[in-house]
Amino acid sequence: MHFETLDVRLDGAVATIALNRPDKANAMNRTMWDELRTAMQWADDTPAIRVAVLAAHGKLFTAGIDLAMLDELRHAVATGCAGRAREQLRRDILQLQATITAVERCRKPVLAAIHGACIGGGVDLVTACDMRYCCDGAWFAIREIDVGLTADVGTLQRLPGLIGEGMARELAYTGRTVQGREAAGIRLVNRCYDDADSLRAGVQDFARSMAAKSPLALRGCKQMITYARDHTVADALDYVATWNASMLVSDDLEEALLAGREKRAPRFAD
C-alpha cells in the first residue's frame, strides 16, 4: 500500500507500520491520523498478517500531534455559529479517537518499538498497542498539560490500567519526562533494550514468535484480555466460555495436536 506519511512493509506474517515524517519529527498531521486508521484496518483485514509492529523512522518516535493541525482545530471554533463549530470539533476529536482505537481493535497483536521521544499523541498511540518496547534513550511525556489541554484521545483512559492510577495522574498532571529505564520500571513498556538495533531485533523476534502461533488463538487472547479490562471477572468468564464454545474446536487445534504427535512445529493456516 502507498502512504504519504507511513512506510508500510510486510515481511512474512509480520507487518511493520512506520511513522515516516522524519523531517517533521514524525508530528502527527491530519494525513497521518487518517493513514494510521487505514493501515490498521489493512492489518486487521489481511489474513496473511498475523502480527503488526508500530515503529518510526528518524531520530525520534513522534513529537505528537502536529501543532499546525492543532491550530486549525482552534481556529475552526472561532468563526461562525458557536454551537455548530463545537459540534464539528467534537466530531473531529471522535475521529482522532477512532484512529487510536483502531490499533486496539485490530484483531492481530500490535507491538510498539519506540526510540527517541514519544510525546503527547504518541503516548495515546502506544498505550493502545498490545505491548510496548523501547531502547535506552527513549523518553515519554504527556505534554498536553503544558499547552493547556486535557489529553483526549486515549492516554487518560488506557494508561492507568498499565501503570496504575497514581503514577498516571503524576505524569498527566506534571507533564514530566519518563526515560526508557524508568518506563520499564513502572511497566509503561515491557522491556527497555540497550540501543535501537537491539530494540528492532528484539521486537522482530517477539513478532515472529507470535506469528508462529495459532492465529485464531492469538485473536481470542487479544479479545479476551481487552474485554476483561473493561468488565467484571464474571462477565469476562462468561464471554470466554461463549467464545470457546464457538472457536475451540478448530483446524488450529487439530494441527497443534497432530504436530505434537509428530514432534514437529505446527503449520497453521492464515
Image (tube, rainbow, N blue to C red):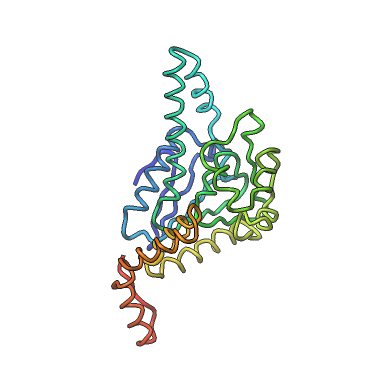
Q: Nearer the viewer, residue 255 or 195?
A: 255
> 139 above or below 189?
above
> 128 above or below 195?
above
Q: Position of residue 25 (x, y in %)?
A: 57, 38
User: Looking at the image, which residue is at 43% across and 13% down?
Assistant: 81
Q: Nearer the viewer, residue 104 or 213?
A: 104
User: Looking at the image, which residue is at 35% across and 43% down?
Assistant: 2
Outermost residue, front side: 234
Q: Nearer the viewer, residue 266 or 18?
A: 266
Q: Position of residue 91 (x, y in %)?
A: 42, 29
Q: Position of residue 96 (x, y in %)?
A: 46, 36
Looking at the image, residue 197 sits to the left or right of residue 173; the answer is left
> 11 above or below 263?
above
Outermost residue, top side: 80
Query: In which quadrant of the rendered view does residue 189 lie?
Result: bottom right
Q: Quadrant of the C terminus?
A: bottom left
User: Looking at the image, which residue is at 32% across and 67% down?
Assistant: 247
Q: Report the label total.
A: 0
Query: In which quadrant of the rendered view does residue 246 lie?
Result: bottom left
Q: Position of residue 167 (x, y in %)?
A: 68, 48
User: Looking at the image, which residue is at 35% across and 67% down?
Assistant: 244
